[in-house]
Image (spheres, rainbow, N blue to C red):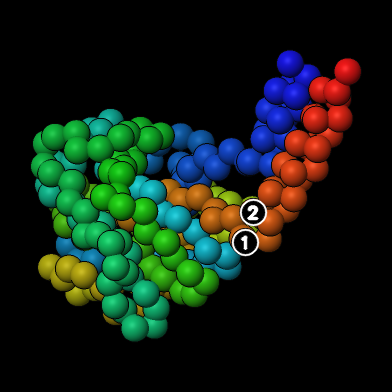
């Protein structure tokens, strides 16, 4: 019994709980869109330590909960603008609930397979917005900027936002003004990927606790 308790206790210490982190969050209350831009909208971020992206999402107007027109989200590498392998595009169908609703105005879909992003620069881009489903733009009409969650330094929100010409899809090439979270458009959820040193420490600690458990088990 003591051995079991010791081993379970060690597992609890050594194996952290990796909860999904939502990169862009609502600033307290749900926000309604204020811009009918039909081109791609993107926001840049830097990965400081390898992360695993588990879900991709889009902004929908507060109170509607479902997109009124089809929306699409995708991840791209910077500065190349190449699509990230496995990073989309993910489509959100019109007038349906194609994903999990978060904070009243974000819809997320789980990616088909986890997307591992190595240290480097990326952008999360979304398109399909318009008069029937407005995006948010903090550059005018005084709407509050989204909250930012860097996962304790796993990522950094960098530079300015970016956009594509009206009607464009895919990678947005035109740099817009700051802040880095200027738009309500694309979003993603992620978790940190433990470094090899973590596993080495966990194994060493488990072996030490196993030896201690054997000692306690002796009559």
Whether residues under marks 1 and 2 lie with C-beta atoms below 8 angstroms apart, the answer is: yes
The image quarter containing residue 41 is bottom left
The image quarter containing residue 156 is bottom right
User: In the depicted view, which residue is nearer to us: 119 or 58?
Assistant: 119
Q: Residues within 10 Å of mark 2 (few under 14, many from 20)?
A: few
The image quarter containing residue 60 is top left
In the picture shown, does residue 205 fall above or below 193? above
Question: In the visual, does 9 lie left or right of 32?
Answer: right
The x, y position of residue 21, in whole percent, is 50, 45
Q: Which residue, given by chain and number where applicable, does mark 1 sit on? A: 196
Residue 125 in sight from this viewpoint: no
The x, y position of residue 5, in whole percent, is 73, 22
User: In the depicted view, which residue is nearer to us: 12 or 62?
Assistant: 12
Residue 199, disc: 2
Residue 119 in sight from this viewpoint: yes
* SS label for mark 2: helix
Question: In the visual, does 218 lie left or right of 112?
Answer: right
User: In the depicted view, which residue is nearer to us: 217 or 92?
Assistant: 217
The residue under the point 13% across, 49% down is 70
In the picture shown, does residue 79 fall above or below 159? below
The residue under the point 64% across, 54% down is 199
Query: What is the quadrant of the N terminus in the image?
Result: top right
User: In the depicted view, which residue is nearer to us: 175 or 157?
Assistant: 157
In the picture shown, does residue 108 fall above or below 192? above
- Marks 1 and 2 sit apart, C-alpha to C-alpha, by 5 Å
Residue that protrudes farthest toward the front in the picture: 219
The residue under the point 27% across, 72% down is 83
């Amino acid at each position: 019994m003591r051995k079991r308790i010791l081993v379970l206790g060690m597992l609890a210490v050594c194996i952290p709980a990796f909860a999904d982190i939502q990169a862009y969050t609502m600033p307290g209350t749900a926000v309604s869109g204020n811009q009918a831009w039909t081109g791609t909208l993107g926001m840049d971020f830097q990965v400081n330590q390898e992360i695993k992206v588990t879900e991709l999402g889009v902004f929908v107007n507060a109170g509607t909960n479902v997109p009124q027109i089809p929306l699409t989200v995708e991840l791209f590498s910077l500065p190349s603008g190449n699509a990230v392998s496995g990073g989309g595009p993910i489509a959100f169908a019109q007038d349906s609930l194609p994903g999990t609703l978060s904070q009243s105005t974000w819809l997320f879909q789980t990616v088909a397979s986890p997307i591992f992003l190595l240290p480097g620069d990326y952008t999360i881009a979304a398109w399909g917005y318009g008069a029937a489903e407005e995006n948010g733009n903090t550059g005018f009409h005084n709407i509050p900027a989204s909250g930012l969650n860097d996962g304790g330094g796993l990522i950094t929100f960098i530079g300015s936002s970016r956009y594509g010409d009206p009607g464009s899809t895919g990678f947005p090439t035109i740099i817009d003004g700051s802040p880095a979270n200027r738009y309500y458009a694309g979003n993603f959820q992620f978790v940190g990927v433990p470094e090899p040193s973590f596993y080495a420490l966990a194994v060493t600690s488990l072996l030490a606790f196993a030896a201690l458990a054997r000692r306690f088990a002796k009559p």
